[in-house]
Amino acid sequence: MPQEQFIAQKGIIVLNGKILLVKEAVSEEGTNPGLWDLPGGRLAFGEKPVDGLRREIREEVGLEVNVGPAIYLAEWRPKIENLQRQIIGVYLICRPITEHVKLSPDHAEYQWLTPVQAQALPLVTTLKEAIDAYLAYSQ
């Protein structure tokens, strides 16, 4: 079976004690339709990690951010069709420079929520643990 490994970065974008979550739209390319996630995505080969995360956030929600520390590392192994993937997820705290959210077509909606409110939503794999890590870090 073909295999693929990549790094995905997610931005825990914090503003006034709330974090930005996005809901994946139903589409042919989406793997988690209807679930909530953080903005971010794959790091391109040769791309500097901070530049890659800023690019993904800009593409997905139209924000410019300052990237802070990485606070959580996760792994998941989805099998999509005949392809086994290993995804390494790195979660970093970000602070918005701009505040006007403009969603990409990949997302149906967004919300600024407290971490506790966010954990009540249907979340993608490992996001609850990443939010727990943010709560521990921010105390």
Image (cartoon, grey):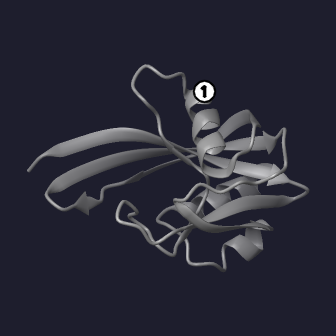
Q: Position of residue 79 (x, y in %)?
A: 23, 60
Of residues 12 and 126, the one nearer the viewer is: 12
Task: Pinpoint residue 13: horizontal percent, then vertical percent.
Answer: 74, 50
Judge whether 83 appears above or below 34 on screen.
above
- Asked if residue 135 is positioned above or below residue 7 in the image, the reply reads below
Residue 61 in view here: yes
Q: Tag 1's secondary structure?
A: helix
Q: Residue at x 74, y 44 (%)?
A: 63
Query: Residue 11 vs residue 40: left or right?
Result: right
User: Residue 70, percent across and down?
Assistant: 64, 38
Q: Is residue 71 visible?
A: no
Give the answer, above or below, for where 117 lies relative to 59: below
The outermost residue toward the right is: 16
Q: Residue furthest left?
A: 1
Q: In the visual, does 23 lie left or right of 125? A: right
Badge 1 is on which residue? 51
Characterize the local packing of mark 1: few (<14), some (14-19) or many (20 or more) Cα atoms within 10 angstroms.
few
